[in-house]
Image (tube, helix red, strand yellow):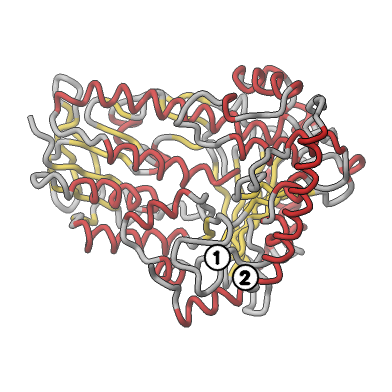
Amino acid sequence: MEVQHIVIIGGGTAGWLAANHIGKAAQLLPNVKVTLIESPDIPTIGVGEGTVPAIKQSLQSFGIRETDFIRDCDVSFKQSIKFCNWLDKHKHGVGNSYHHLFDVPSPLGTDLTDYWLNQASEQAFSQAVSPQHYICESLKAPKLITTPEYSGKVSYAYHLNAAKFAKLLAGNAITKFGVKHLHANVLDADIDQQGNLTQLKTDKFGDLKFDFYIDCSGFESILLAKKLKVPFVDKSKQLFVNKAIVAQVPITTKDAIPPYTIATAHQAGWIWDIALPERRGTGFVYSDNHMSSAEAEKKFDRYLGGKLANLESREIPMKVGYREQFWFKNCVALGLAQGFLEPIEATSILLTDFAAGYLAKRLPQTMGQMLSLSARFNDTMTYAWERVVEFAKLHYCISDRTDSDFWIDNRHPDSIPEALKQKMMLWQDYSPITDDLFSRFEVFNIDNYLYVLYGMKYQTQSSQLDRLYCNTAKQQVARIQQIGQSLAAELPEHRALLNKINQFGLKTI
């Protein structure tokens, strides 16, 4: 049996990212048609406003102009996540912070990690190893108005309005890739004797038959979880935060826009703060096993300067974990239907884009291919999810905060994944290198680990260094500072560049 009719259940960022990836791939398969069914009654979560640099490659491959994307989705540039108060204030000062930058560390050819570890200086790790530190701290954009689309002086991603992003993706998938768009509620589905889905029951179009089903129905996971009964792998014993209060804060056109996400730790979690041109997207993420809803609301209100009562806010429960299988029979889940960990490091859109792109490269053309393709997909995605669990946990378990049970509990060995424990033991004696990671399917690479580990003052044993290395490293650290200061002077203020892009557009290659 040929796979000719593919259906995506659910819109939002996940559904329409999938529609673009799958729709583009299906253009090479002349008999394949792609349909997306979106409920007119179920609102999308719509708070995933942070991305990582990999999203640029996807947008470019979809044929979306960066200028149009920035104009249509209230975009601002993201060059880093600035983590505030993740360390003990008594040891490291009130308002301690570090940058997890997007540009590679040590860009001049010599790995500066061991040199920085041996210096024991007050200079932040990101400041020593990357010019981007200076750009971020100066609130500058990552590029000029004359820099071509999707290129920059340094690496970057975006902050965006999730609802507008889904709309842009929808228009692109429909017009460029011929994805059919239906508005209807999926009420149920039929299954054959082999356990494959055979048709959907909808309220507006009756029974609709398809060959391959992609579940992007969010936390509900109406096909993979509810109909096919694929079990859930709970990760709440490792990642404790399970609720978020979200609110959008209006800003004026005169307010500066930080070119990074601000992630501020508190007693039982952390707060995200993402500045778009006309508002800040904020969210108070916490563990309800360590803090009551009333206390969380009170602390969030304090962070927002006593303005929470005047803002529209809502609480989002977060079921922490992922599905035991992501591809079962002839159904694949993407986005929140796959699972959810927490918003740290913008992992939700990252995993959705990664999974959808991977699936598009291995679309089944016959029903007989499902078994081998699904086995590979499940192995790959399980590996990816486990690495994301580890990287998210790293932020908590190496913190030296002792002001609450939340931070103390996060350091308990039973809550730390075994593979992460092994890495941390290795990195007590040796600074991390690429060979410490095993797979090309690592979601976060060694650069990401370096910024977080040494931003949080992780204690790695100093090694013996030869004089030639030290002299070279010293010169490169000084050169990085010069480059950073030069770029900070050359690059435009972040809001000023966004205004110019909206007026004139970016240069196309």
Q: Quadrant of residue 441?
A: top left
Q: Residue at x 13, y 44 (%)?
A: 29
Up/down of 293 relative to 226, above or below: below
Task: Tell me, for residue 76, which label it has, or none.
Answer: 1
Which callout, 1 or 2, points at the residue further toward the start of the chain? Answer: 1
Query: What x and y, as percent, mark residue 44?
Result: 41, 53
Element assignment for label 1: strand
* On-image quarter of the C terminus: bottom left
Residue that numbered label 2 is attached to: 494
The residue at 61%/59% (across/down) is 274
Q: Is residue 65 left or right of residue 345?
A: left
- At x 88%, y 43%, the residue is 121
Select label 1 or label 2 by which is in front.
2
Q: Is residue 171 left or right of residue 503?
A: left
- CB under 8 Å between discs 1 and 2: yes
* Residue furthest front as drawn: 468
Question: What kind of residue is marked 2?
Answer: His
| Mark 1 burial class by Cα count in 10 Å: few <14, some 14-19, many 20+ | many
